[in-house]
Image: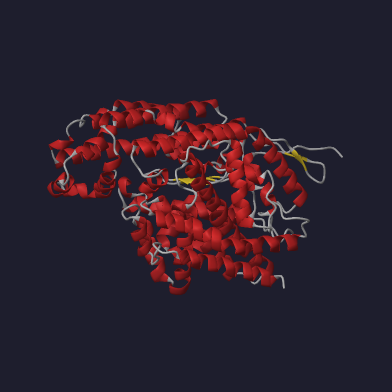
Amino acid sequence: MEKTLQKRIARSEVPVEHTWKLEDLFATDDEWNNELKAIQNDLPTVTQYRGKLSEGGKTLLNCLKAEEKLHLRLIRVATYASLRSSEDGTSPLNQGNSARMASMLANISAALSFLDTEILALPIGTIEQYIQQEPELNVFKNYLEDLLEKKPHTLSAELEETLASLGEVHDAPYMIYQRGKSSDMQFSDIEDKDGNLLPMSFALYEDRYELSADTDLRRKAYSSFNHSLNQYKNTFAATYATEVTKQVALSRIRKYNSVTEMLLHPQHVTLEMYHNQLDVLQTELAPIMRRFAQLKKRELGLDKMLFCDLKAPLDPEFNPQTTYEEASKLIIEALQIMGPEYSDMIQTALSERWVDLADNIGKSTGAFCSSPYGVHPFILITWTDTMRGAFVLAHELGHAGHFYLAGKNQRVVNTRPSTYFIEAPSTMNELLLADHILSTTDDKRMKRWVISQLLGTYYHNFVTHLLEGELQRRVYKLAEDGKPITATTLCEQKRELLQNFWGDAVEIDEGASLTWMRQPHYYMGLYPYTYSAGLTVSTAVAGMIKNEGQPAVERWLDVLKSGGTLKPLELIKKAGVDMSKPDAIRSAVSYVGKLVEELENSYN
């Protein structure tokens, strides 16, 4: 039989309707280049206030307004460079522009570092006086209060400027990791049962092969994937170790009690809230997820349950296909419950190229939503014509809806809430989509499939990302104790925590221990555990929407519009949930238990 190879296409070959409309940021690369230079030339509009912030409220207000204006322009140029790099990381032009952008951001950060240091140098009570003198400063009140909280951890003006000027160096570990993934890592093709050679990439493994119903193909893909990961493990470990060393050093320089305390500070999250999330889920969810794994093993007739089988479809013969257009229609219907303003935004996003859905060489893996203030959100996914993609798309549209509403109702300085809350609006949309499908079908297999998708979401947030969070907790502890962070250490730790969670239900092989290499989240502070916090909140609020209807929807929309004006505890309480205690986490675990039980019963 003649073998055929399905080739991945170059970015230049992607149909324009499958790409995002970056012209909404800049019409051409030349326009972007010109703005990059113009911003540097306009830096004195802010730096003219250097050394003058003690002159009074009016001066501070003028300085903050000038900085805000410059910041809005910076958001646009930085987003453009970042999205170009995400759509094709192999392009020398995109790589060069990313480097230029990073360099400029470091220079501007250093030039503007006087702002924070001068505000912090003001005598106690001065800011309050300034706000009385100039009521317009109230817009910046949250920013100023957050800044004053950092006072005990702020260095001298000279040192702050020096640290700021090293921004490009501080960002290097993440840049090297991403570059290695998108540009250097090569994977061997795999052969399907008909003898066809299939291409392999990071995106294709995570978006297609890992979810394949074909056990032989899924395991072959896993083997090819891990073979390449293994070749890069020492380089990636050194890169991550550099990130960890940087954070530990910064926490000591800034006189925090621990790196965890420093990284939780901007999230406005207590150590108790952080540890609750990690501890309760690992202890109480593990037995439920083991039952889920055992159900899969039994129903799929697997000889053994490998780590790479965890995302296999429970009903392999039933994998609903859908086009992007059909999925868009379904999502629009499911989110009607959110009201006209939200629904109109979703309609626009799906019809006016806010989404990049192609698969091409050099494209960033996974899915994300970037929301530049004053423009509109941009969503990156790799569309594979499966219904699962509808859930991924709904998730990213949740982020889009959140920042669209926050941006319409708040100034840029007040749009972003704590990362502790960030994943709540996205997972909310997944839950609403699932509920819509379940309420409009009598098909037993479709219902079973939707419950499996929901469990996929809980697996993603309550297991995958949570165990990333646990690895971070362990790694930072080891680093603070002076232990070296090597590939061996990372693999050992990852393997141990996976074994602790899955027990005898899943075979944790060598490839599973390389899972720490797969996610960029380790370079984003204490981000991984927040996925589980967000889903805990959305689980609670989705239940309220189901029970109360409109009043719960209105509270939720109010929370989204609040942006970053409230600390996470207060923000979430506005929706009707208290995250200061572990009760909401336990309720979410209980809900997952009911889903697993429903699946088990459907097979009896």
Closer to the camera, 582 or 538?
582
Q: Is residue 49 above or below residue 465?
A: above
If the image is split into quadrants, where does the N terminus sit?
A: top right
Determine which quarter of the picture holds residue 254: top left
Instruction: Kindly identify the residue that appears in the image at 53 percent across and 53 percent down.
Output: 466
Q: How many marks?
A: 0
Closer to the camera, 146 or 326?
146
In the figure, is residue 241 to the left or right of 197?
Answer: left
Q: Is residue 379 above or below residue 33?
A: below
Q: How is the image coloured?
A: secondary structure
Q: Residue 525, how many percent across, how many down?
A: 44, 43
Query: In the displayed image of the protein, which residue is found farthest to the right?
Result: 1
Q: Is residue 12 above or below residue 291?
A: above
Q: Residue 138, how many percent across, how many down?
A: 21, 50
Closer to the camera, 164 or 393?
164
Q: Residue 402, how many percent across, how many down?
A: 41, 54
If the image is split into quadrants, where does the C terminus sit?
A: bottom right
Q: Residue 61, how many percent across, how many down?
A: 19, 41
Looking at the image, can residue 515 be seen? no
In the figure, is residue 360 to the left or right of 99?
Answer: right
Looking at the image, can residue 49 be seen? yes
Closer to the camera, 357 or 492?
492
Instruction: Kindly identify the residue that appears in the image at 73 percent across and 58 percent down.
Output: 316
Instruction: Kindly identify the residue that appears in the image at 55 percent across and 61 percent down.
Output: 283
Q: Is residue 252 above or below residue 344?
A: above
In the figure, is residue 557 to the left or right of 322?
Answer: left
